[in-house]
Amino acid sequence: MTIDTTFLKSIAYFSVMNPTELDAIKPLFSEKTVQRGEVILREGEASDTLFFVAAGAVKIFKTSAQGKEQILSIARPGEALNDIPIFDSGTNPVNAQALGPVILVSIKKEKLHGILQQYPNVALNTNKVLAQRMRMLVTLVEDLSFRHVLGRVTKILLTHAGDGVGNTDHLTQQEMAAMAGTAREVVARSLKALEEQGFIRLERHRIVIADKKALEDIVEDSG
Amino acid sequence: MVEMPEINQDKCNQCGLCVTVCTCGAIVVEEKKVTIIETEDCHWCTNCEAVCPTGALTCSFEIIVEE
């Protein structure tokens, strides 16, 4: 893949730029490919380059001293991995790991700052992106604090469900547990409970949502 | 091609727990390396993922909504 203006336009930061402006900033970006399982960013390390996902999916997570993992989000094409250290000059607050083969597009911090100074509308748009990220984190705190585990697991199923064609997320029970802030066994029990009620079917390599309305009701009642 | 659980050889410590819990004989040790054999007998019980102490074995699910 080569970096083109269509891809740059799909990045929320740069969505307000016109084709001429996008053409002008295009040479500032680099591209690299990482393999499934490769750690792209480590918590505590400094970042001088901002990474965007161009293809594939990246797990953004924290790890406790005991090795417990909490997934904060799954970054998809167009999303940034490490804008927090790029803007506050601190270290990476999270880890990032490729969930499959991933293509990354990156820009050096000082070059990004140059774009923000030259194009004030991009700087304004960046505030919007960061506010949306904060809203997402507030929702996660709300889910972890107030929603019971079955509701959290059910919400994960609904959030990551696809139609079976095109790009659909693939998640292990371990990854669902790390998203829900619980143990893998609890996720397994929750899935079994949903299956026994006929709301989902656990098939080979697939979880089929048979009664979406029932799952939505569980999420609604768990908040 | 039959979808099978995936193994990350870099994480695998060849403890063999997955081999003992696999109910369909799809996981074997060949030349000190845990290998997964493609078979439709695998019903995705995920026992291998559950017992793996290093997280080397993964059984992912595609989540879809029934039409």
Image: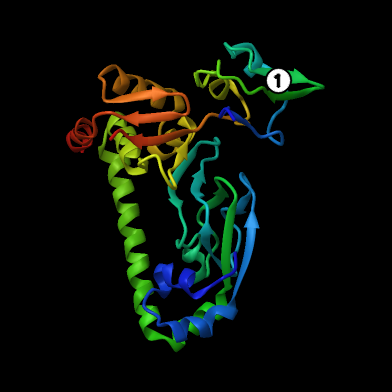
Question: Measuring 27% from the left and 45% from the top, which residue is drawn there?
Answer: A142
Question: Measuring 59% from the left and 80% from the top, which residue is drawn there?
Answer: A27
Q: List the single residue furthest toward the front.
A: B1
Mark 1, secondary structure of its residue? loop
Q: Nearer the viewer, residue A176 or A62?
A: A176
Question: Measuring 40% from the left and 83% from the top, which residue is drawn there?
Answer: A18
Residue A100: percent from the left, percent from the top?
A: 57, 46
Residue A135: percent from the left, percent from the top?
A: 30, 57
Displayed quadrant of residue B41: top right
Q: List the single residue furthest toward the right.
A: B31
Residue type of the residue flagged with mark 1:
Cys
- How many tags in the picture? 1
Displayed quadrant of residue B64: top left
Which of the colour schemes (rainbow, by chain, secondary structure, one colour) is used?
Answer: rainbow
Vertical arrangement, residue A221 with respect to residue B52, above or below: below
Vertical arrangement, residue A32 with respect to residue A172, above or below: below
Q: Is residue A148 left or right of residue B62?
A: left
Residue A122: percent from the left, percent from the top?
A: 39, 79
Displayed quadrant of residue A11: bottom left
The N terminus of chain B: image quadrant: top right
The subunit carrying tag 1 is B
Q: Nearer the viewer, residue A153 or A18?
A: A18
Give the residue at mark 1. B15
Vertical arrangement, residue B58 with respect to residue A83, above or below: above
Vertical arrangement, residue A197 with respect to residue A159, above or below: above
The C terminus of chain B: image quadrant: top left
Residue A206: percent from the left, percent from the top?
A: 43, 30
Q: Is residue A171 left or right of residue A98?
A: left
Q: Residues within 10 Å of mark 1 (few under 14, many from 20)?
A: some
